[in-house]
Image (cartoon, rainbow, N blue to C red):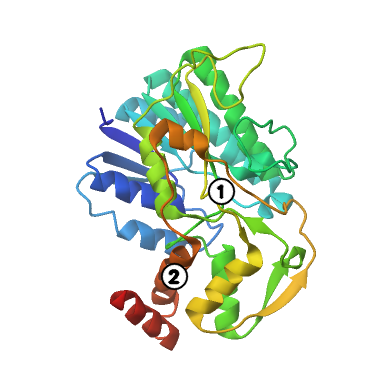
Amino acid sequence: MKPRKVLVTGAAGFIGYHVSKTLLKSGYEVVGLDNLSDYYDVELKKARLSHILDQDHFRFLKQDVSEAAKMDRLFRDEEFDAVVHLAAQAGVRHSLDHPFVYVDSNLKGFTAILEGCRHTEVDHLVFASSSSVYGANTRQPFSEKHLVDHPVSLYGATKKANEVMAHSYAKLFGVPVTGLRFFTVYGPWGRPDMALFRFAEGILQGRPIDVYNHGDMWRDFTYVDDVVEGIIRVLEKPAKPARAWSSEDPDPARSSAPFRVYNVGCGQPVRLTDFIDAIEDVLGMESQRNLLPMQPGDVKSTFADTSGLEEAVGYRPQVSVEEGVRETLNWYLQFYHQDSSHAKVLVNAASQG
């Protein structure tokens, strides 16, 4: 049975907007919450919201998840059936210089969400973790059964903390909770600081683009529609205690409590230089590449084993990198470069396809 009323935090964000839109199409009542932070262009967040604000079963609240008293009142007043918690301070590099922002949003904010779910007996909490939890682990593909005890960024550490905090609430209070480790999500309405948009803008302006680790990096790029499909499928299947779980040989992905963790990726890592090639193919322009060493807090490669999610809910990503890049640049050029000849060419090609 589908939950009737869902709280989506980070509803003005990239993934949160797409999740809210899909839930509304599926007949849910959605309460969207976002603090509209200025980490990136607030006008982009407002533009996302403008596409769903007039929906009959959508309400938006400008509120910060770290405000514990307000969150407690919200949970008690609304009595949500389920929560999709996507609000967080994102960005590995940003965490190097702004650590306390991550503590407030990702730790204090998540505690407020857990407390709200605990005291109002929410049927299922689904929250965003990240591939960043794998940190220094180089054993690939990354599996939920691997230990994730060596994060290489504060951002990754806060996501690891979220997972263990969630487990404690599942164990102590019986809150059904599922964490989803997202792998390099991209697509229309994405954050301006995403690599695809930075590369595209540099190419269009004829500027050199910064390519780290001299291009020898691999990412499990995952199109946003596939990620949303995974979220919705998980939401409709609340976590339950694992019958065969052993405390003597514990499986990190599950528990004797109603707790699960899944990877949400494409399962097909792409070399960064090939990703740039795909952008060049769509734009019909070549890039000037400024090859640089690896940045602090970054990792060379990510590669998701998604067999756990496929087994649990039938998750199978559908969108290839080539198709995803084309769809994303189609949106990007229309949104940011409406008068550009590149936008017109791409729009015409998309309509003919």
Q: Residue type at mark 1? A: Phe
* Residue 214 pos. (x, y %): 76, 67
Identify which residue is drawn at 72% across, 51% down. 299
Q: In which quarter of the image is the C terminus?
A: bottom left
In this rendered view, identify the residue nearer to me: 50 or 320: 320
Q: Residue type at mark 2? A: Arg
In this rendered view, identify the residue nearer to me: 176 or 241: 241
Q: Can residue 13 be seen in this view?
A: no
Identify which residue is drawn at 51% across, 84% down. 284
Q: Is residue 278 visible?
A: yes
Residue 327, located in which quarter of the rendered image?
bottom left
In the image, residue 320 sits, relative to residue 331, either above or below, namely above
* Residue 201 pos. (x, y %): 56, 76
- SS for dot 2: helix
Which residue of the protein is positioned furthest toward the right in this rendering? 293
Q: Which mark is residue 183?
A: 1
* Residue 38 pos. (x, y %): 53, 58
In the image, residue 335 sits, relative to residue 120, either above or below, namely below
Residue 94, located in which quarter of the rendered image?
bottom right
Horizontal placement of 152 versus 266: left or right? right
- Which residue, given by chain and number where applicable, does mark 2 sit on? 326
* Residue 106 pos. (x, y %): 58, 39
In the image, residue 348 sits, relative to residue 81, either above or below, namely below
Q: Which mark is residue 122?
A: none
N-term-proximal mark, 2 vs 1: 1
